[in-house]
Amino acid sequence: MKRWIPFLKSDPVVSVLRLQGSIAVSGRGSLSDRSVAPLLDKAFSGKPAAVAIELNSPGGSPVQSSLIGARIRRLADEKEIPVIVFVEDVAASGGYWIASAADEIWADPSSILGSIGVISAGFGVHDLLSRHGIERRVHTAGKSKSMMDPFRPEKEEDITRLRGLLEQLHDTFIDQIKTRRGAKLTTETDLFTGDIWVGQKALEVGLADHIGHLEPAMKARFGKKVKFRRIAQRKPLLPRIGLQAARGVLSEIEERAEFARYGL
């Protein structure tokens, strides 16, 4: 009845959005700008007192990380609603990029934050092909078209070019963190080597603002009567079949590998 009586003040509402998984343009359960857009729109609707994001991501696509972070910031500025990220197990690499879009970053004492760097990994199988008498035939127009072909020996010029591309991405990542975190970042430690920090140490170097958990923090800020409106990522109701099922399994393996990098 309270909301229908104009002179009575309603209890504050905090939208709680959970974002978990690796960041990729596709894949079951992965985070992408397309998959989170409707969730963010819903979280910011109805003029909540704040949008709290429960974040648990080891990273992934630089572009999708940038798009998601930009969308969060755009909605926060347009609607003038503060965004507060609560890191669970990990917010690393692209996961930290998303966290940096928030007005505040909270962490558990055991949360892993950072990994502000860029990685490119693959396999070389040219020796295996040679041992089995398999000849690889590739014809290109453009000398860089077959760069880093895993079926051929690495070329020094390809490695140099790849490193240049990675440096460009790294510079963009660094600019994002410096722009969003600014004077909060320590100048005594190089935070951009790809290293990670845990809980209190992440707080000390400026990668986090507070140590604590969502509900106690929001009740301390907005009062004990604050209401939580939870918005979750949807999972498929039925397992996929055929090729889609195989892709789903591969996506899950890749995601587990990403989390495993941080001992999770």
Image (spheres, rainbow, N blue to C red):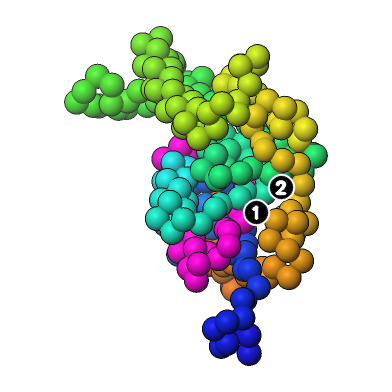
Residue positioned 58% across, 62% down in the render: 49
| Residue at the far right in the pictured view | 109
Q: Taking 60 as reference, is 191 left or right? A: right
Residue positioned 63% across, 21% down in the render: 186
Residue 54 is labelled as: 1
Disc 2 marks which amino acid?
Answer: Glu
Residue situated in front as seen by the camera: 141 or 130: 141
**Figure label count:** 2
Q: 10 Å neighbourhood of mark 1: few (<14), some, or many (≥20)?
A: many
Residue positioned 47% across, 31% down in the render: 179
Residue positioned 64% across, 42% down in the render: 105
Residue that badge 2 annotates: 88
* Quadrant of the image containing the N terminus: bottom right
| Residue at the far top in the pictured view | 156
At mark 1, the secondary structure is strand
Nearer the N terminus, badge 2 or badge 1? 1
66 inside magenta stretch: no
Q: Position of residue 77 (x, y in %)?
A: 43, 51
Residue situated in front as seen by the camera: 144 or 65: 65
Residue situated in front as seen by the camera: 10 or 165: 10
Q: Find the magenta span and give its range.
A: 40-64
Q: Position of residue 249 (x, y in %)?
A: 59, 54
The reply to whether dot 2 and dot 1 touch (C-beta < 8 Å) is yes
Give above or below for 152 relative to 215.
above
Report which quarter residue 184 is drawn in.
Answer: top right
Spatial separation of the CA atoms under disc 2 and disc 1: 7 Å
Q: 10 Å neighbourhood of mark 2: few (<14), some, or many (≥20)?
A: many
Q: Taking 108 as reference, is 250 left or right? A: left
At mark 2, the secondary structure is strand
Q: Taking 122 as reference, is 157 left or right? A: left
